[in-house]
Image (tube, rainbow, N blue to C red):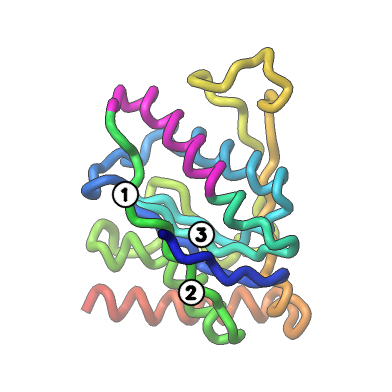
Amino acid sequence: MTEPRFVRPGDTVMVTRRTLRRHHLFRPDPAIRQLYLYVLAVCAKQFGILVHAVTLMSTHEHLVITDPKRRYPDFLRDLHRLVSLGAKVLRKWEGPVWDHEKSSVVRLLTEQAMVEKLAYVMANPVKAGLVAQARDWPGVTVLPHELGRRTWVIERPRVFFRADNAKWPDTVELTLILPPVLAEAYRAEEVRQAVADELERQEREARA
């Protein structure tokens, strides 16, 4: 039996989940970016999740979110189910999309942990040896200057989501929010600069 998760209101966490056998089902292209962001926006709104950063690699996702209402298990359930169903159509894939292991959810208990993991999510393509700098990744990602102020407006994908179903709006917005703990303690520009400095450090380390 799967052990229950310890979920507290207001937790900020980093989520990671991989595709089955690390197949490149999320290789970056416009269709997969649209699908993932649309589902992320719909589910975040439904469950009251605050999204801080996201990077979608070809084989896995990284999210940093805050869960004010203790709903992130439901959020992840729906996010992963809908992304899986849409990706199966896009990729003409018949098997499972996600690995059978449950999502990795790491609670970020300190301000420093939040800064480090925000930068880690951004630096992931560099750590994987795919690009020299985080800004070069062509898939879904976030950069330090976008924290707390970037808004995506995403149209409903043409696959899977029926236009006559009110659950799936024609367009949906996803706005990045600064982690509340950091937003209360520092000015927004101080947070962005701290993450930018940490990202630069992690990029240097990865290239070395």
Q: Secondary structure at mark 3?
A: strand
- Disc 3 to disc 2, how far (Cα)? 9 Å
Q: Earlier in the sequence, mark 3 or mark 2?
A: 3
Question: Which mark, by number, is residue 117?
Answer: 2
Span colored in magenta:
77-94
Q: Position of residue 91 (x, y in %)?
A: 32, 27
Q: 160 or 129, which is in the foreground? A: 160
**Which residue in the structure is indicated by mark 3?**
63
Left or right: 108 as drawn, with respect to 135: right
Determine the main secondary structure of the stretch shown in magenta: helix
Few, some or many residues within 10 Å of mark 1 (<14, 14–19, 20+): some
The amino acid at mark 2 is Lys
Q: Which residue was labeled with disc 1?
A: 99
Q: Is residue 163 above or below residue 15?
A: above
Q: Which of marks 2 and 1 precedes in the sequence? A: 1
Residue reaching furthest top? 164
Give above or below for 153 relative to 21: above
Say which amino acid is labelled 3: Leu
Front residue of 162 and 103:
103
Q: Earlier in the sequence, mark 3 or mark 1?
A: 3
> What separation in Å lies between label 1 and label 2 (alpha carbons)?
22 Å
* Residue type pointed to by label 1: Asp
Q: Residue at x 32, y 37 (%)?
A: 96
Q: Position of residue 114 (x, y in %)?
A: 56, 78
Q: Which mark is residue 65?
A: none
Secondary structure state at the residue bearing disc 2: helix
Q: Residue at x 71, y 43 (%)?
A: 46
